[in-house]
Structures are given as C-alpha cells and as structure tokens.
Image (spheres, helix red, strand yellow):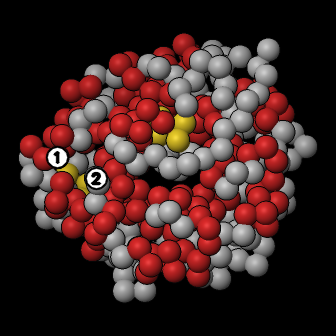
Amino acid sequence: MLLVAQHVRFIKHLEQKRDSSLAYHVTAHLRMNGVYWGLCALSLMHACDALDRAAVVEFVLACFDPASGGFGAYPGHDAHILSTLSAIQILALENALSVLDERGMRTRIVAFVLRMQRPDGAFQGDVWGETDTRFLYCGVSALAHLGALHQLDTPKTTAWVMQCANFDGGFGTTQGAESHAAQVFTCLGALSILGALDLVERDMLGWWLAERQTPSGGLNGRPQKVEDVCYSYWVLASLSMIGRLHWIDPQKLSAFILAAQDPEGGGIADRPDNVADVFHTLFGVAGLGLLGYKGLAPVDPTYCMPLAVTEKLGMARPFQRVTVDWE
C-alpha cells in the first residue's frame, strides 16, 4: 500500500528543517529542483495544497536572474536551464504561469532558453557551455510549457538527439556516450514534444528498456548496475512514450517501489532499507502513477507532470496506458 499520509507529511516537513539541517544549506544548488520534486509528488497524491501556494510562488520569483532571463536554484544563484524548467513547472503546478506575463518575464525566459542552444543543435545548461541531452530536454520542455515551441529550430534539435543514439537503441549524454535510461527519457521526451518519435526504432529500444528490470522487480539504468527507484519513472515513461509499457512486470516493480517506503518518517528511498529523499519520493510515486496505481492522479510521461496540467496547457502528447489489477 502506498503510504500517502506519511509521504505528504515527509514533504511538508522538509522545508521546516532549513534552520537546523546542514543538509538543507549544502544542497541549496538543488533547491528549485527539490521544490518541483516535492510539489509534483504532492500533486500526484492529490495534496498540492499541503504547501503554501503564495510562499512557493514567491520563492520561484525570488530566484529569477534578471541579467540572464533564467532562474537560478536559489535566490542569488546564477541561472541554469535545469532550475529554469523546474521553476516553470512549479508555476504550472500552482496554476501561476500568468505571473510571468504580469511581470513581463515570459519573453525573457524564452530568450534565455533559446540562447542555450548551440549551432550544432545541442543545448548547454548555462553560460559555462557544458552540453548534455538533459539540458536539451529541459529547453524543449520549458518552451512547450511557455507556448513557444514554434521559436525553436526543430530539425536541428531532433538531428542532435539522433546523433546521440547508440547501436543498442539507447541514448547517451552526448555523441558516443554510453546508453543510460535517464538519457533515454530525456531524448525520447524531447522527440515526443517535437512530434518526432517516428525517428526511433521502437522494438530495439523497447527491448533495451525492458532488460532494465532485475530479479528484484526494480529497474536499473544500465546493464550490470543495481536497481534504483528513480528508474521506475525514467524507464516506464520511456516505454509508455513508445508503446511498450506492457513489456515489464508491473506487479514486481510496484512491490519494489512500495518496499522502499519509510513507514514511519515517510518518503521513498532509492531501494529498500535506505534513507528516503524527496527525489526518489517523486519518481517512485510517478512510476506507480504510470502503472495506474489506485488513488494517484494520471501522469504525463513526457513531462513528469500531472496529465490534467499538461492537458490544460494544451501540450499533452500521446502515450500508452496500462491497466493493472491492484486488488
């Protein structure tokens, strides 16, 4: 059974540790992402109102970097495309994207994202120039949330994604990099948003993804690696986008995710008996959501957002659903 009440309490208590927890201060570079992870998990569990909406929106706006037009992870931090997408997603979850127009910020954010694309089609994360298919996905997803996809050079973008494909059907962080389940998600997610999934050899990739399920029921990110709850989302979302979600055992996977819960303090860990964190809590809940777990809101696998939100924004993409007997 998914321990919803404990998980909601766990997420609510995270913010209350900021004055006493060293971990809170040394992870400031992840704060915007962390707010998204927590808020999205709450939304999928129908508990979005557990956090103070006004305080959440205020925090996001405080992280805007007027010099670049993007969002940093924390007030005063430099803008990065990762935290920029999370900021946009948080506002979408709180039905507050209109604040960007009220403050004249939307066009500046779009300009920031577009500046992060290099001439070869790759995306860098910030002014320092590091490229990664994660950053490409963040850029494409951010533009979709902002209704600005038409400003992106789609052929150049999809061409770069396909240059990162490997002989095994998977995708890496860049050209020639090893296939990794998280990078598969980012590349498929970008192609899904851009309506270019027909470029993918679905059976080959589906086989590679299905092979990520281990005897424990959990999923790993690469061959010969241990299973981890976060891949419950990365792998399932990818399989859903290419219509091969039925190629894994949902009952064994859900049992693995549920076994990683902390029944007392709440939250979900990377694997059973480890310490829970908000990152794995979201992706464990989202993984269960993709399996249609009872009581959870439907998940849009392309965006890791509640389907109701992406439908409202008019950006939802086709995906496969499965029906699991949870009794």
Q: Which residue is mark 2?
A: 146
Q: Quadrant of residue 32?
A: top left
Answer above or below: position of 98 versus 81.
above
Sequence order check, earlier mark of 2 and 1 = 1
What is the spatial separation of the Cα atoms under label 2 and label 1, in whole angstroms?
10 Å
Q: Residue at x 28, y 60 (%)?
A: 148
Q: Is residue 279 visible?
A: no
Query: Which numbered dot is residue 100?
Result: 1
Disc 2 marks a residue whose amino acid type is Leu
Asked if the residues shown at circle 2 and circle 1 are in contact, with their CB atoms under 8 angstroms apart, the answer is yes
Percent position of residue 106, x then y: 18, 54
Direction from residue 58 to residue 154 in the image, left or right:
right
Direction from residue 304 to residue 114 in the image, left or right:
left
Q: Residue at x 66, y 29 (%)?
A: 292
Q: Residue at x 31, y 47 (%)?
A: 88
Percent position of residue 20, x then y: 37, 28
Direction from residue 305 to residue 93 in the image, left or right:
left
Q: Quadrant of the C terminus?
A: top right
Disc 1 marks a residue whose amino acid type is Leu
Q: Secondary structure at mark 1?
A: helix
